[in-house]
Amino acid sequence: MTNPLAPPGRALAIGAHPDDVEFGAGGTLAGWARAGCRIVLVVVTDGSKGTWDRQQSPAALVEQRQAEQRAAAAELGVTEVVFLGHVDGELEYTMDLRSQIAKLIRTHRPDIVLSHDPWARYEIHPDHRATGWAAVDGAIAARDHLFFPEHGLEAHRPDSLLLWRAAEPDHWEDIAQEFATKLGALLCHRSQHHTTMGDAGQGREERETFEQQLRSVAASQGAAVDLAAAEAFRLIRL
């Protein structure tokens, strides 16, 4: 599907770690926010293992990563950020996690839910897999009233799921106009400059290298549908 979705009124984006949403769907969300969409961004884990600095305190890292996520969310135009606080790297897919996601969907009542594709080939990070399954299964539970009646909330059926890093993408969103915003949001995650962004905070050359890498990914995803820069997804109608 090459036609973009109409900007929804409400969207819920669910990432395993701070910066996952920006990498997967930052450009798409920035465009929707500009069109007036109310976006809630959910971070499932606390990000406490996301450093190569052996002197970094995990507790201090959690605080830093939350501050970075809030700054990145503001860059994108996100309305609200929710931190579930599960321990980084130790996330397990459980019925309780499914219930948490279903409750968020019932509370915020999004038209579209975005998250990791749990079917992605060779996805080696267990937190990504667990979050993806919880998002998909939580959306199913949220729509049917007999699941989790203890929530005390009305059932809610989102229109669709958009899954990033999809095993078999079938939907693309043009992010050419929003690329700079996506880049700016990612650069807010200063604690991750060394681990995932090629030391982008070290200087102009490193930042330009990271920008080119990000542009290359966007161009590669867009090439399938003749877009200069895109984010690719699997679209699942609910």
Image (cartoon, rainbow, N blue to C red):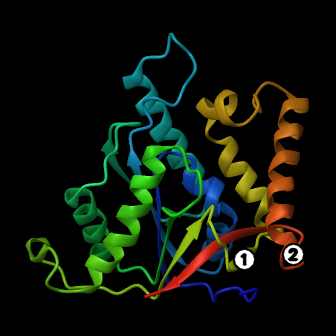
Q: Is residue 149 visible?
A: yes
Q: Which x, y percent locates residue 169?
A: 67, 73
Q: CA distance from mark 1 to mark 2?
A: 9 Å
Residue positioned 35% across, 76% down in the render: 139
Q: Is residue 59 left or right of residue 161?
A: left
Q: Residues within 10 Å of mark 2 (few under 14, many from 20)?
A: some
Where the C terminus falls, by quadrant? bottom left
Nearest to the observer: residue 229 or residue 130: 130
Residue positioned 72% across, 77% down in the render: 172
Residue positioned 83% across, 36% down in the render: 207
> Secondary structure under badge 2?
loop
The disc at residue 227 is 2
Name, please, the residue furthest toward the top.
55
Q: Which x, y percent locates residue 92?
A: 31, 47
Q: Is residue 88 left or right of residue 172?
A: left
Q: Which x, y percent locates residue 218?
A: 80, 61
Where the N terminus falls, by quadrant? bottom right
Q: Is residue 235 left or right of residue 174?
A: left
Quadrant in the rendering for residue 155: bottom left
Residue positioned 79% across, 66% down in the render: 221
The amino acid type, in three-letter code, at marker 1 is Trp
The amino acid type, in three-letter code, at marker 2 is Leu
Q: Are marks 1 and 2 in contact (CB under 8 Å)?
A: yes
| Above or below, comparing residue 158 to residue 56 in the picture | below
The disc at residue 172 is 1
